[in-house]
Amino acid sequence: MTHRNAIQFAYWVPNVSGGLVISDIEQRTDWSYDYNVRLAQAAEKNGFDYALTQVRFTAGYGAENQHESVSFSHALLAKTEKLKVIAAILPGPWKPALAAKQLATIDYLTNGRIAVNIVSGWFKGEFDAIGEEWPEHDERYVRSEEFIRSIKGIWTKDNFSFEGKYYQFTNYTLKPKPIQQPSIEVFQGGSSRAARDMASRVSDWYFTNGNSLEEIKKQVDDIREKAKANNHHVKIGVNAFIIARDTEEEAHAVLQEIIRKANVEAVHAFGDAAKEAGTASKEGEGNWAKSSFEDLVQYNDGFKTNLIGTPEQIAERIVDLKNVGVDLILSGFLHFIEEVEYFGKKILPLVRKLEEKNNH
Ligand SMILES: Cc1cc2nc3c(=O)[nH]c(=O)nc-3n(C[C@H](O)[C@H](O)[C@H](O)COP(=O)(O)O)c2cc1C
């Protein structure tokens, strides 16, 4: 049984090839539509609230093939009933008027189950390849913030006008407005100061890379304090690569095998490209600023969150994260469908029990 403020769960949609770890270990995960439909259906049956698609125009780290995020999200929504799917969008290739219109239509077609993740870009090579401008790190967030203000303005106001550096609107009225009121949920990804400041002003959700409990707590406290000063409420989602096995030894053996079989060249190539994001921000606190080789094998630092062990250990650590203010766990798995089912059967009931206990 769920209760008020139950922690929520999302999973990464494998709409790019190669799985969620940059390793030659066997991954019973597939980027095909058929596999993804079965996964989405299994996820909604097993207690997942959201699925997050990835946006990628070129291969970054062995992710050789990528399906486009918005159309793929819509196709998954068409085959599910309750799951919300978060489509990832990059300001640059997308313009806010198109994104707002496209997502409002999908909202209608799916009875209000679309959400959006505004990502600011980490891969310069990708932007160069498709002829898009590559503003420097903090400037990318100036653009993203204007993008979010624009789509939210379009969704919530008639005669919307906006005078930004990157986007301008004059008396624009979108009809119909989305079904979801007051607006479609807006997530964002990134951990730098610029990302946190943007979250504390405009986003509904702040998504961050995996990290230790202490580091996550620092981010949560920082963002919540700033958001409060701005009279804004933002929820927090944290990435974790979950390795749940019946014994702790088995779970750790899987982690060791993933790292032992890492695709060294691709991990280094990814690490170099990611520096454009992680260390490019002035304060050097962005995603990947402090990631080791082992961390980078899961491309959003998912091992660091340490949801690796038995169902009991993982459930306890999830509730610890909730207790420092985390609202959602964004999860990745080695063998997606089978592990999402294991999660629903073995871990989720323990999480709900612990939450219930905490409430009394
Ligand atoms: C949960 C999450 C999902 C992300 N998804 C994407 C994505 O699909 N495509 C993309 O290009 N970047 C994605 N990013 C990268 C961010 O947009 C951002 O470039 C990166 O996190 C570095 O930001 P920072 O320097 O502000 O920390 C994602 C980041 C996070 C945390």
Image: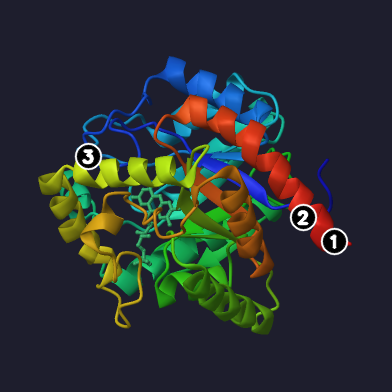
Q: Position of residue 229 (x, y in %)?
A: 66, 84
> Which quadrant of the picture is home to ligand 1?
bottom left
Residue type at mark 3: give it.
Answer: Thr
Crowding at mark 1 (Cα within 10 Å: few <14, some 14-19, many 20+): few
Q: Residues within 10 Å of mark 2 (few under 14, many from 20)?
A: many
**Where, quadrant-wise, is the N terminus in this rendering?**
top right
Residue 287: x percent and y percent?
Answer: 35, 65
* Mark positioned earlier in the residue sequence (3 or 1): 3
Please state the horizontal and vertical placement of residue 331, each as a whole percent of the image: 50, 45
Q: Is residue 41 visible?
A: yes
Query: In front of the other: label 3 or label 1?
Result: 1
Q: Is residue 61 above or below residue 224?
A: above
Name the amino acid type tagged 1.
Asn
Q: Amino acid at mark 2?
A: Glu
Report which residue position mark 2 lands on. Answer: 355
Which of the two labelled residues, at mark 3 and mark 2, occupies the earlier sequence position? 3
Q: Is mark 2 within 8 Å of ligand 1?
A: no
Per the model, the C-alpha gap separating discs 3 and 1 is 46 Å
- Any mark on residue 359, and which? 1
**Picture coordinates of residue 308 (x, y %)?**
46, 49
Task: Pick out the residue farthest to the top.
Answer: 34
**In this picture, is 98 found above or below 96?**
above
Residue at horizontal 25%, vertical 42%?
A: 22
